[in-house]
Amino acid sequence: MITRVLLVDDHKIMRDGIRAILKLDEDFQVIGESDNGTDAVALTRKLRPDIVLMDIGLPGLNGIEATAEILRYQPDIRVAILSMYDDEHSVVSAIRSGARAFVLKRASDSDLLDALRTVAKGGSYLSPQVSDRLLTRIQKGDLDAKPLPSALEGLSPRELQVLRLVAEGKTSKEIAVMLALGLQTVRSYRKTMMKKLSVNNVAGLTQLALAAGLTKLPGPPAREQLLSASAVGGE
């Protein structure tokens, strides 16, 4: 039985390489591609692949958020995260989002195929380097799950998602499209977050998101543009 795969990566050269690998294996068929998390969610609903091979670093919705969105409505679909990072926070976040595999981009072709075959059969897979590091940290008792700062503990997962996008300079209209929400719903989220966090404007939300590490401020001149936009409300 052929396993239908949706490729999600913002680098075309990476998608081309993975597609070439899977094309040589009769067990897999690439049925679609996306270069961002928002479109990946929409394509998954349209194409209903067996597996979504998801890059973790994507524009808009990142791979973790896109995975959570996909599984919120289609829990039967399996997601395998592909990442160039092997830090514990990324791995734990991916697992918590519902991903069934975490594969490093430096993995060999055979490791990638093994991961996809394992996931296709209903199993789970971690790249050996990742599983070894996690095992060592767990045995030492010092695995850092990086809990949220206390100021953000009262926010729901959806509110945290909206907060990150607000901090990245997205308008309410853009967020509504990205998350398939109504415009008034997004605005309501913003108002609720401001009340919960005791801030009066988008600039305040942005500062808290940056301090919590939900996003990173881009370098100049984008930094100045983002701060200017957040100061005036970012609607």
Image (spheres, helix red, strand yellow):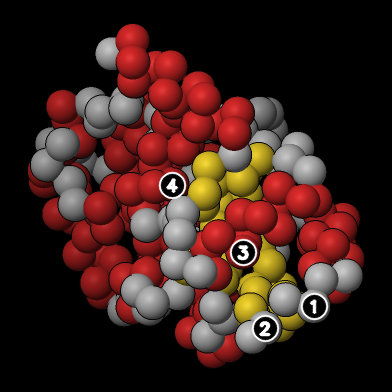
- The answer to whether mark 3 and mark 4 are in CB contact below 8 A is no
Residue where numbered disc 4 is placed:
94
How many numbered discs?
Answer: 4
Do residues under tags 1 and 2 come within 8 Å of each other at their CB atoms?
A: yes
Mark sitting earlier along the chain (2/3): 2
Foreground disc of the pair 4, 1: 1
- Residue 227 x, y percent position in the rendering: 49, 36
The answer for how far apart the CA atoms under marks 2 and 3 are is 11 Å
The secondary structure type at the circle numbered 2 is: loop
- Amino acid type at circle 4 is Ala
Q: x%, y% of residue 193?
A: 19, 48
Q: Secondary structure at mark 3?
A: helix
Q: Residue 122 shows which numbered tag? A: none
Three-letter code, disc 1: Glu
Q: Which residue is mark 1?
A: 26
Q: Quadrant of the N terminus?
A: bottom right
Q: Residue, x 45% and y 59% (percent of image)?
A: 123
Check whether the beta carbons of the residues at disc 2 and disc 3 lie within 8 A of each other: no
Above or below for 104 versus 135: below
- Disc 3 to disc 4, how far (Cα)? 19 Å
Q: Earlier in the sequence, mark 4 or mark 2?
A: 2
- For the residue marked with disc 3, what is the amino acid? Arg
* Label 2 Cα crowd, 10 Å radius (few <14 / some 14-19 / many 20+): few
Location of mark 3 (residue): 117
The disc placed on residue 2 is 2
In the image shown, does 214 or 82 lie closer to the viewer? 82
Say which element carries label 4. helix
Dot in front, 3 or 4: 3
Q: Amino acid at mark 2?
A: Ile
Q: Secondary structure at mark 1?
A: loop
- Closer to the chain start, of discs 1 and 2, is 2
